[in-house]
Amino acid sequence: MKPMSEAHFAILRRHMVEVIGIQVDLASEELGKAALDERVLAAMRKVPRHRFVPSFLAPLAYQDTPLPIGFDKTISQPFIVALMTDLLGPEPHDSILEVGTGLGYQAAVLAELSGRVWSVEIVEELAGQAEANLRQLGCSDVAIRIGDGSRGWREHAPYDRALLTAAAERLPPAILDQIKPGGRIVLPLGPDEAQWLTVVDKGADGQTSVRKLIQVRFSRLETVV
């Protein structure tokens, strides 16, 4: 059998976005909406997920499921990537902090919708491969740092938005500190048995409001003691 072409992957990508739409509709009561922002869906249709997974998994890249990327990490389910991006609400000139680069897929989606993405990854090998993946796609609006993501990336703060792709039992204080008043954080929050996809809004006075949406299961946020 001949290998899949970019045209084949593009068809699968469009189908992936259709499945995301079904998932959102099914969860509309919990989410408070029946459809995602079209800008987010356009980014999902554009960014080639198959370029951000190990090559032998490329034929599976557009299934609505997480996939292993090594080091006990996964690339998130497309529905979750799209939902978290939609909840974050990135605007074209926003500066975004991402915690947990993985192989760069979520960062590439965010870069389609914002001004600049600053991404922190604790696993050096993943960070190096993510940089290569993004470079091959000509994505120049993402910078990657190797380190403890719970500490954020203070040199480029404050950020308009922050997105965590690993679960924390409590919101890391450094992340909240690095978000502008009026900004937003989206993350999986809680212990392993009770993680919730959570939206944290930081008011103009610095006070926060927290909204829990659906239960999820992410790997834990790794920190350096």
Image: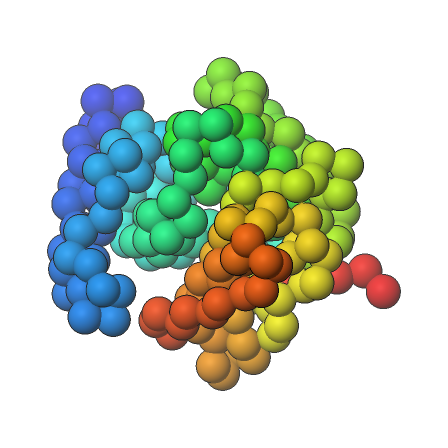
Number of disc labels: 0
The quarter holding residue 58 reads: top left
Q: Position of residue 93 (x, y in %)?
A: 48, 27
Q: Is residue 30 visible?
A: yes
In this view, 132 is above or below 190: above
In this view, 171 is above or below 124: below
Which residue is drawn at the image coordinates 58% and 64% (left, top)? 207
Which residue is drawn at the image coordinates 67% and 63% (left, top)? 172
Q: Image check: 77 left or right of 191?
A: left
Q: Position of residue 170 (x, y in %)?
A: 62, 72
Q: Position of residue 188 (x, y in %)?
A: 49, 65
Q: Image check: 155 left or right of 200?
A: right
The residue lying furthest to the front in this view is: 205
Q: Nearer the viewer, residue 198 or 107?
A: 198
Question: Considering the image in quadrants, where does the C terminus appear?
Answer: bottom right
Q: Nearer the viewer, residue 208 or 147?
A: 208
The residue lying furthest to the right in this view is: 225
In this view, 110 is above or below 150: above
Q: Image check: 12 left or right of 185?
A: left
Which residue is drawn at the image coordinates 58% and 50% (left, top)? 181
Which residue is drawn at the image coordinates 72% and 43% (left, top)? 153
Q: Is residue 23 visible?
A: no
The quarter holding residue 89 reads: top left
Q: Nearer the viewer, residue 194 or 13?
A: 194
Q: Nearer the viewer, residue 224 or 11?
A: 224
